[in-house]
Every structure is written in structure tokens, then in C-alpha cells.
């Protein structure tokens, strides 16, 4: 058996100043999805995460809490690890910078750099930002404050050791040129070159004497090793690197790292400081550093002081682990910041997970049980409409893998959910409930349900890195293991596959008002226990002057008790055929459809994007009010109204003619 190719991937280690919010948690979920995908591809994956536990900020927080720094970081590190475990993170190593073996190697590396002349002693005088643990010259300040976080800075002067960054600047720039894939996205690389390398690197302060909570310098114990030389080296100490040359076989196997996954705010430290430290130690550089964007709350960076912080455990309490994993992975673009609100998550769960994925699985399983007792068999009754479904299924892995290789995770998920929508369209095209009425078409019905189940199994296998529990549930529903990736070019079900009872309903549709009530009950319980005092979501939204969404209504009290036949006669309704459809930019709920009404073509904007995709709309015949006064929505003139039905739970269906009738036909 051939030996698997090693693949080493890491997150940035999380600073133990407090509980991480969902924006921090996004990084670990992102990295986990990549690690799981690589394992499924057959790689020997090593996935490392952990906590950064030294520094002046920690020392001050511990003093304020009346505990020792070690006791303080022990508590926060335990909390961070619990959140990672709750999010179903498959890490292999959780490192802490207070681990004895890590601290010992930091001391050794410092002395090695000191001995080879890369570190020297001097005096630092400048403006210091405690939250960022960074010194700044007056010219680097922005409006007199820290250019990174915008907080106050204080003058500071102390003896310190410095690293000669300029010694390696040209060599690093050459490495950039020879390895264009080293920094991703490309915009991050351009920023490093233009803002830091070309203007000239300043020597870096790598020790402090004004606080004691850190790794002492062996040869000068009144100094502690400054944050980045301590924190960044975790990527090699976690593999058993030894500065004396006696490294663990793990280091020989997995270094250099294949990918460091980090936030865009610390790209400079990972693509300038870290490579230079490695050059000083005579070690190869990591293959890629991916600086992901931020997850914003209503367009703003999350901050406790702003009262706009959301935590992963709160979201999981309301929506479940896989729904939260899906949202943060799906709604975070490759290069631009993403956005999160409770309402956005609710909409995404309803549209993608309940309507698209959940309904597809439950409908297929239910029909298989109803018509064949759960048996799944290809009766060989194929028709041309099957070929497109099969072609998309067998090409799906390659499409997803290509996106994953570029770390375009949202796009990879988009390929899977586009295929799921194609499966739903296949149900509409084949109409199994109609086939079931004709005994002569039983073979065709069996083939259709087999094809659906086979397509679902392809999607389930590819969903596993993103939504592991959901993928396993789907596999159990169809009584078969998740398929191996090297088998996905074959459109077939594993032997013995059948639908087991009861039918799984993977995701329930959520009413936003109920979500609000559940959230508020959670915080009321925490407040009663003397725990988290974060403002409830309605309070936070009020601060942002965001109106609460109106409850959906579909009952008779919303309408006049009676109208006359003359009133009804004023409404002209016709059959329209959708010939083109697209999403309206920056409007999550709107679709722009081009419809044909007889020989006439019109544009209609409809608030149905949570329920139907553009692909599902094209080719449909719908019922439309055609004498409605045109209205402008998001700058688009809408020339009518497509009619839908909505039940009390918010489930929505387009109204359509039951049989084949031409567009332009009048509805009476």
C-alpha cells in the first residue's frame, strides 16, 4: 500500500484574553473543512491549532481578575478548546504556548538567533499599544492612535533585544517572486510588498522587561521573549522541532507546513516576521499562507464595546452545529469580508438547508418508502432527462476539488448546492407522484428514485468536510457508508443501499420571531446564573437602528372581509413563462425574472430568493398579475407580480397551471 502524502495545516493560535466570538471561530471551522477534505482525498493530514498565552495584556487581565496569569489562561484555554470541540473540529494537536516543551524550544531558538548575530540588545523608545502588544513610531500612528486597533497608545522606553529584519528583506522578496502562491489572496501579497518590504523593514523588538508573564531569555532572565517570536514558533514546536538538531520524526515528516490559515489582520506577522525567523534558523518556509477576510456583524467588526458580538455556542443553541458551520463557510467570500446577523442565518437555514437539501432528502426517502418499501433499484428505464443529472453528479467532485485547492470554500459549497438544486429540478421534471399512478411506469419510477438517491450520496460525501454530522445522517438514511472520493465518477449506489425508517428531516424551517424568543430565553437564563451579560439581540439591533422584521402572515384577518365581483374583475391574471432569471445584487431575498406573456416580454422582481434559485425558475410557467402598476425595486422596474401561496409556517410555493397551457393564457 502506497504511503500517504503528508499535509500539514494550522490555524493561528487564539489569544487567551477572553472568549472567542463567531468571527474568531470561523477560522477554525474553515481550517477544519480543508483538513477534512484533504483527508477524504487520501492525504495524511496533521491539523494543529491552539492558544497564545503570554504577554502584558494577559498579565493585566489576570491581575484585574485577582488570579495568577497561569490560572487565568488555563480557564480561557479550556473555554476555547470546549468551543472548538463543540464545533466538531478534527484537530490533531492543540498546542499552548505555556506548554513546557514549547517554552524550552523558544528559549533555545532565541539563543541560537542571538549567537548568529540576528538578535542584538538595544533600547526601545516609542508609542506602545497594550491590546496589540505593538510599538509604533509617531509617524505610524493614525490620528494619534494605534493604526491597527484605533486604541490609545502610551509612550514607553525600555531595554530590549531586537531582530535584524533588514538582513533578510531582499531574500524574502526574492522568495515572494519565486513562489507566487506563497501568499493568498493576491491582494495580501501586494500589501506586504508595497507597504512593508519596499519601504524598508525596521528591526523588530523581540523582548520586554516591563512585564514578567512570558518566556524568560535564558542568558538574560530579566527579559521575556516578546509575543511574535514566542507565538509564531508554535507551528514547529508543535511538531517536536528541536533547535539543537534533535527534532522529532513528526517534524521531519510534516515540515514545511502546507498551509497556515490566518486572519487578514496578522498576514504581516506570518509572511514577513515568520519567514525571516525560519531563514535565521535555516529552515524551509511554509508553502502557503492564506489570510482570510473578517466576518462582520451588520457590516461592522465585532467588538464587546460595540455590543455587536455573537458567540458560536449561542448560535449552536438556536440552530445546531452544522447549520452554523454551513453559514460561516458559505457566506464568507474568498477575498472580501462576510456579514452575519441572526436574520441572515435564519433565512439561509430556511432556503438552503430546509428547502433545498432537507426537502430533497426527505422527499426522496419518503417516496422510496411509499412506493417500494425503501428498496432502491435501477430498473434500467432511462430517459434523456437522466443524462444531465448523471453528468453533473459525476463531474461534481472535480469542480469542488478545484475550488478547495484555491481555498475558495464558499464557491466549493456553491457547486454542491447548485447540484442539489438540479436534483430538486429533476423531481419536478420526472414527477414521481404521477409515474406512481401508472403501473406500467413502475420501472421508470424505480429508476428515477434510484437516480435521486445516487445523486444525494454524491452530494453527501462532498458535504462531509463542511457538515460532518449531516452527511452521516444522510448516509444512514440510505443505509450506506459515505462514498470515497475516488469512486464519485461512477454514478451508482453502494451495494445494499436502501431507505431506512423513519425518514430523517435534517433541518426544520425557522420562524424568525421564534429564533428571537429562543435567543432571549438563553440570555435570560445566563443572566439569572450571573453569567454573560451581553445585550439581547433585540437590544443590540435597536442600537443599530435596525427595525425588527415583520412576522409573516397568511391568515384571513389580513384581508378585507368581502370584495365584489367588480373588484376581482379589475385584476388581470395570465400564465407567464420564465425565460431568464438572476439574483438582484445586494438583495438576498430578490430575484429578477424575465417572463414571456404570449408575444410580450416583461421584467418582474419577486421576493422569493429564499425559496427558489434562478436555475429553478427558468422554464417554469407561473401565474402572474399583469395589470399591476409598475414599481421600481432596487433600481429595477418590475412590471407585474408572480403569485405564490404561503402557509402559516412560512412555506412558500409558486402558483402554476396544472397542465400544459400556453403563456399569455388568461386566468379566471
Image (cartoon, helix red, strand yellow):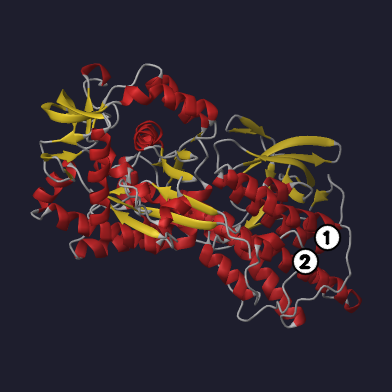
How far apart marks 2 and 1 lie (CA) works out to 8 Å
Position of residue 388 in the picture relative to residue 498 (left or right): right
Is 495 located above or below residue 211 in the figure?
A: below
Instruction: Judge by depth and name the residue closer to the eye, 525 or 236.
Output: 236
Q: Which image quarter holds the N terminus?
A: bottom right
Q: Residue at x 43, y 46 (%)?
A: 340
Q: Which structural element holds mark 1?
A: helix
Is 129 located above or below residue 345 in the figure?
A: above
Where is residue 532, by image quadrant? bottom left
Q: Which residue is mark 1?
A: 386
Q: Which structural element holds mark 2?
A: helix
Instruction: Judge by depth and name the residue closer to the eye, 530 or 264.
Output: 264
Position of residue 383 in the picture relative to residue 292 (left or right): right
Badge 2: residue crowd in 10 Å (few <14, some 14–19, many ≥20):
many
Q: Pointer 2 and pointer 1: residues touching (CB < 8 Å)?
A: yes
Residue 550 visible within the image: no
Instruction: Judge by depth and name the residue closer to the eye, 74 or 153.
Output: 74
Question: Residue 544, position in %: x, y?
Answer: 34, 40
Question: Residue 203, position in %: x, y?
Answer: 27, 24
Position of residue 594 in the picture relative to residue 517 (left or right): right
Badge 1: residue crowd in 10 Å (few <14, some 14–19, many ≥20):
some
Q: Which residue is mark 2?
A: 451
Amino acid at each position: 500500500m502506497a504511503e500517504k502524502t503528508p499535509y500539514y495545516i494550522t490555524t493561528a493560535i487564539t489569544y487567551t484574553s477572553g472568549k472567542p466570538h463567531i468571527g474568531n471561530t470561523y477560522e477554525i471551522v474553515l481550517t477544519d473543512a480543508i483538513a477534512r477534505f484533504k483527508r477524504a482525498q487520501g492525504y495524511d493530514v496533521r491539523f494543529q491549532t491552539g492558544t497564545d498565552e503570554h504577554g502584558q495584556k494577559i498579565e493585566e487581565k489576570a491581575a484585574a481578575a485577582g488570579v495568577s496569569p497561569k490560572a487565568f489562561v488555563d480557564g480561557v484555554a479550556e473555554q476555547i478548546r470546549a468551543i472548538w470541540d463543540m464545533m466538531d473540529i478534527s484537530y490533531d494537536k492543540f498546542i499552548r504556548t505555556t506548554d513546557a516543551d514549547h517554552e524550552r524550544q523558544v528559549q533555545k531558538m532565541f539563543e541560537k538567533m542571538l549567537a548568529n548575530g540576528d538578535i542584538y540588545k538595544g533600547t526601545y523608545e516609542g508609542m506602545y499599544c497594550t491590546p496589540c502588544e505593538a510599538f509604533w513610531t509617531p509617524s505610524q500612528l493614525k490620528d494619534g492612535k494605534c493604526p491597527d486597533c484605533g486604541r490609545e497608545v502610551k509612550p514607553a522606553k525600555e531595554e530590549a533585544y531586537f531582530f535584524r529584519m533588514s538582513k533578510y528583506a531582499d531574500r524574502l522578496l526574492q522568495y515572494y517572486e519565486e513562489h507566487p502562491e506563497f501568499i493568498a489572496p493576491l491582494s495580501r501579497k501586494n500589501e506586504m510588498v508595497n507597504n512593508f518590504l519596499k519601504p524598508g523593514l525596521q528591526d523588530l523588538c523581540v523582548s520586554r522587561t516591563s512585564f514578567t508573564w512570558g518566556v524568560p531569555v535564558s542568558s538574560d532572565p530579566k527579559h521575556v521573549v516578546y509575543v511574535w517570536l514566542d507565538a509564531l514558533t508554535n507551528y514547529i514546536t508543535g511538531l517536536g522541532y528541536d533547535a539543537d538538531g534533535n527534532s522529532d520524526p513528526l517534524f521531519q515528516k510534516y515540515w514545511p507546513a502546507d498551509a497556515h490559515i490566518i486572519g487578514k489582520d496578522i498576514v504581516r506577522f506570518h509572511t514577513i516576521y515568520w519567514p525571516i525567523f525560519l531563514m535565521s534558523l535555516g529552515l524551509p518556509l511554509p508553502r502557503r499562507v492564506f489570510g482570510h477576510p473578517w466576518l462582520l456583524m451588520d457590516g461592522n467588526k465585532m467588538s464587546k464595546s460595540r455590543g455587536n458580538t455573537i458567540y458560536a455556542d449561542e448560535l449552536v443553541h438556536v440552530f445546531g452545529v452544522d447549520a452554523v458551520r454551513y453559514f460561516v463557510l458559505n457566506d464568507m467570500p474568498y477575498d472580501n469580508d462576510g456579514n452575519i446577523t441572526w436574520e441572515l442565518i435564519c433565512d439561509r437555514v430556511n432556503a438552503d438547508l430546509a428547502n433545498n437539501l432537507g426537502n430533497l432528502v426527505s422527499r426522496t426517502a419518503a417516496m422510496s418508502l411509499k412506493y417500494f418499501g425503501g428498496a432502491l433499484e435501477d430498473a434500467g428505464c432511462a430517459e434523456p432527462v437522466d443524462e444531465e443529472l448523471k453528468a453533473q453528479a459525476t463531474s461534481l467532485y472535480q469542480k469542488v476539488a478545484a475550488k478547495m485547492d484555491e481555498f475558495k470554500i464558499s464557491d466549493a459549497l456553491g457547486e454542491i448546492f447548485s447540484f442539489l438544486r438540479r436534483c430538486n429540478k429533476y423531481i419536478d421534471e420526472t414527477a414521481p407522484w404521477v409515474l406512481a399512478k401508472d403501473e406500467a411506469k413502475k420501472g421508470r419510477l424505480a429508476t428515477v428514485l434510484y437516480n435521486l438517491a445516487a445523486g444525494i450520496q454524491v452530494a453527501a460525501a462532498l458535504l462531509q468536510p463542511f457538515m460532518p454530522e449531516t452527511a452521516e445522517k444522510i448516509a444512514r438514511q440510505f443505509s450506506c457508508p459515505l462514498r470515497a472520493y475516488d469512486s464519485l465518477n461512477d454514478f451508482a449506489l453502494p451495494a445494499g443501499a436502501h431507505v431506512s425508517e423513519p425518514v430523517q428531516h435534517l433541518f426544520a424551517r425557522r420562524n424568525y420571531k421564534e429564533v428571537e424568543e429562543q435567543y432571549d430565553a438563553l440570555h435570560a437564563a445566563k443572566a439569572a446564573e450571573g453569567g454573560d451579560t451581553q445585550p439581547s439581540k433585540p437590544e443590540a439591533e435597536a442600537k443599530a437602528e435596525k427595525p425588527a422584521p415583520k412576522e409573516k402572515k397568511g391568515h384571513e384577518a389580513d384581508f378585507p372581509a368581502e370584495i365584489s365581483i367588480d373588484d376581482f374583475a379589475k385584476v388581470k391574471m395570465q400564465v407567464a413563462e420564465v425565460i431568464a432569471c438572476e439574483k438582484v445584487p445586494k438583495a438576498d431575498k430578490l430575484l429578477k425574472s424575465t417572463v414571456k406573456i404570449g408575444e410580450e416580454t416583461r421584467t418582474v422582481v419577486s421576493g422569493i430568493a429564499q425559496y427558489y434559485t434562478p436555475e429553478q425558475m427558468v422554464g417554469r410557467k407561473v401565474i402572474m398579475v399583469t395589470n399591476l402598476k409598475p414599481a421600481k425595486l432596487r433600481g429595477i422596474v418590475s412590471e407585474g407580480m408572480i403569485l405564490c401561496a404561503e402557509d402559516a409556517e412560512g412555506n412558500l410555493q409558486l402558483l402554476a397551471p396544472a397542465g400544459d397551457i400556453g403563456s399569455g393564457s388568461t386566468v379566471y
